[in-house]
Image (tube, rainbow, N blue to C red):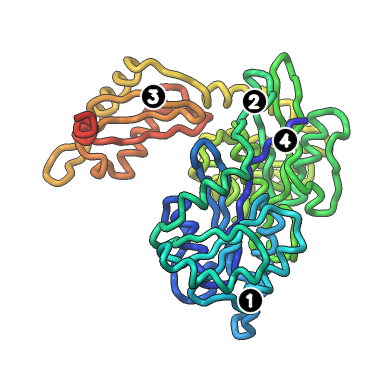
Amino acid sequence: MVNQATAIVALVGRPNVGKSTLFNRITRSRKALVDPTPGVTRDRQYDRVNWKEKSFILVDTGGIDDNPEDAMVDTIREQALAAIEEADIILLLLDAKDGLMPADFEVIHLLRRVDKTILYVVNKIDGPEQEQELLLPFYELGVEPLWVVSAEHNYGFVTLMDGLCEHLPDSEQNGNLPEGTIRMAFLGRPNVGKSSMINLILGKERMVVSEISGTTRDSVDTLLTHNERNYLLIDTAGIRRKGKTTQKLEKFSILKALGALERCDIAVVLIDAEEGVTEQDATVIGYTQDRGRALVLLINKWDLIADDKKRQKQLLEEIALAVPFVGFAPLLTVSAKTGYGYKRLFPTVGAVYRQFTALFPTSALNKLLADAVDNHTPPIYKNKRLKFYYTSQISTRPPTFVVMTNSYKGVHFSYQRYLVNRYREGLGLDRAPLRLIFKDKKEQRERKK
């Protein structure tokens, strides 16, 4: 068994202590909504963070509070509790300017029940001259060290991040896996048949299969050799619908699945043939593309509609409408119960993986770009015709190409989509995601000076 999940760090605390501001600083983004009104962060936000060769998933939570006037309090509280349970490390954020509040003790009481690494972070201290006065009330907590920061003004930030990273495992993407192992994460809503599908593939009961949603409590990895090729099969906890994430201490809902996505090459997303494609299915598929993963869609429980041609056609149309942004992803109809269709999975994964890891010579890429521009003249931007000078591949997994232009801001989405389609067609990348990155040639020259 190999199990090297990406560490999950949860930001926890009562409302309005600066969690979203700290989240934005750590992730170098503006993903979390920042507002002085308590309770603005209604749902969990998360992002991957890299810091000095360490990586983790950071999750921002709604505040834990008992304000009876806020109808959302229970929901936010339960989401935060779920994040605490899902996390490997917890950053408890406290407000130096407000001092210790009853709600802080409520949070601390909850945290004392869990056996997790907890960093107590006192926010809104803008410099060393404020530390002695503002920290004094927090010493009564009897915890050390107290990490001092100003999320807004950056004071103490590097020290906090370095301290956090001391508790993170070294990044070992491949661990002890044989070279060339294809890592496949099975994702989907609870009870869609992920463990049953893996059991079918393995030919023996290696996973716990149950009709009770949430049986798979954490990612479970199994190394399989099939036709002289090694595969790592990652079974994950079900990703729950938003309305069902509020069950107290639901052990692993979405973040562990996101951790599995960080470790895989190919995401195998299962859709229930009887229930059809849901908004949550589309969200899960969106996560796979946010992280640039290859994708295979499995419509499981096909046996339930095997005799209903009208329903089959309707379901395929629904999926095409729900996730048009992954038209490249192979779609297989299967039944984990009867075994129907599953033998097509490995040949399909093999074809996807070859494209996902493909490398192309620069000369062929430049000819492809020149032909594409000749066939469809670029638009005019700010009274100048867009020009594309050259292109090259900068990485695989997924194949990623940089295109040098005289103005990357002028590349309209429609022309970008046109170029993506030409690259797909010209390079034979019809089953894998690809990325085009546009850069200004002028900016590149200035950087080299």
Q: Does residue 267 appear in this view?
A: yes
How many other residues sit within 10 Å of disc 2, few (<14), some (14-19) or many (≥20)? many
Residue shown at 59% from the left, 75% from the top = 100
Tag 2: residue type? Answer: Ile
Secondary structure of residue under mark 3: strand
Q: Earlier in the sequence, mark 4 or mark 2?
A: 4
In the rendered structure, are the residues bearing label 1 and label 3 in contact, judged by CB atoms less than 8 Å apart?
no
Instruction: Decide: is 100 above or below 7.
Output: below
In the rendered structure, are the residues bearing label 3 and label 2 in contact, judged by CB atoms less than 8 Å apart?
no
How many other residues sit within 10 Å of disc 1, few (<14), some (14-19) or many (≥20)? some
Q: Which residue is mark 2?
A: 182
Residue shown at 49% from the left, 57% from the top = 23
Left or right relative to 183: residue 397: left
Q: CA distance from mark 3 to mark 2?
A: 22 Å
Using the rendered view, name the quadrant where residue 393 is placed. Answer: top left
In the rendered structure, are the residues bearing label 2 and label 1 in contact, judged by CB atoms less than 8 Å apart?
no
Q: Earlier in the sequence, mark 3 or mark 4?
A: 4
Tag 1: residue type? Answer: Ala
Q: CA distance from mark 4 to mark 2?
A: 15 Å
Q: Which mark is residue 103?
A: 1
In the rendered structure, are the residues bearing label 3 and label 4 in contact, judged by CB atoms less than 8 Å apart?
no
Q: Which residue is mark 4?
A: 3
Secondary structure of residue under mark 1: helix
Q: Earlier in the sequence, mark 4 or mark 1?
A: 4
Q: Which residue is mark 3?
A: 393
Quadrant including the N terminus: top right
Secondary structure of residue under mark 4: loop
Q: CA distance from mark 4 to mark 1?
A: 36 Å
Of badges 3 and 4, nearer the viewer stands: 4
